[in-house]
Image (cartoon, helix red, strand yellow):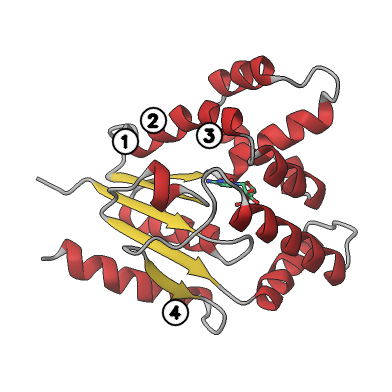
Amino acid sequence: MSKFIQVAIDSPAAAGAGTQAKLIAKHYNLLYLDTGKIYRFIGNLKIKNKKEFNYNLVKKKIRKLKIHNLQSKVLLSNKVAIEASIVAKDKKIRKIVHNFQIKCAYRPSKKFSGSILDGRDITSVIMKNAMFKFFITANIKTRALRRYKELKLLNKRITYKEVLKSIKIRDKNDYNRKISPLKKTKDSILINTTNLTKRSCFLKIKQIMDKQLNN
Ligand code: C5P
């Protein structure tokens, strides 16, 4: 019987976790959920519905949420990213998002060989017992430069300095919040992507996974 593969990844903003998660998902045929997009979706909901924004509205929207709804380009903006890291500090919001993530992590459709989730509390809360746990990081200037280039490709009007500032704000929010702060769990493997190409990073992760899968 083939193994049910579960991969949990945590990382600070723009460390390259999403890129790696997509490559791993494709290679091992896994359902991929970018959990940051859920918080961005809620952040955007708050921006759009300033007055009517409340927990019931969030519950209603998350109940109807499908993974493909998270692909909207609107969710990529810097403004939405910062709002996401603010709503993500709220315990009740995290509780609402919890079940959606659990369903993707533990009950992906039969066509997949498993699941891979990335975010801030995946290795510590959502998939504590995952077969593979990674903490992907890179130095802050590298992260800011990568995100700046991505946003430029999307024709967003933004400077490198603004991106760096927003990543610093989000790091502060994510590492220091009381509920589910970003941290490297003891059993997560550290991958520093600062001096790695996308390909070499993927090969490094693949080597670790294959070694265990072929055991
Ligand atoms: O990964 P991304 O940068 O899209 O995440 C946006 C924000 O969502 C993060 O800065 C973080 O505050 C929040 N987040 C979270 N828990 C997760 C994923 C993202 O708190 N599992």
Instruction: Find disc 3 in the rendering and name its residue.
Output: 67
What residue type is disc 4 on? Ser
Residue 103 got which mark?
Answer: 2
Q: Position of residue 26 (x, y in %)?
A: 40, 54
The answer to whether 108 appears left or right of 142 in the picture is left
Q: Can you see residue 157?
A: yes
Comes first in the chain, label 1 or label 3: 3
Quick check: marks 3 and 4 in contact, CB under 8 Å?
no
What residue type is disc 1 on? Tyr
Give the residue drawn at x 73%, y 48%.
Answer: 81
Comes first in the chain, label 3 or label 2: 3
Comes first in the chain, label 2 or label 4: 2
Farthest residue in the bottom direction?
195
What residue type is disc 3 on? Ile
Comes first in the chain, label 4 or label 1: 1
Identify the element where label 4 is drawn: helix
The answer to whether 80 appears left or right of 96 in the picture is right
User: Which quarter shows the C terminus?
Assistant: bottom left
What residue type is disc 2 on? Lys
Residue 54 got which mark?
Answer: none
Give the residue drawn at x 67%, y 74%.
Answer: 140
Residue 106 got which mark?
Answer: 1
Quick check: marks 2 and 1 in contact, CB under 8 Å?
yes
Mark 3–mark 2 distance (CA, rounded to whole Å): 12 Å
Instruction: Find disc 4 in the rendering and name its residue.
Output: 200
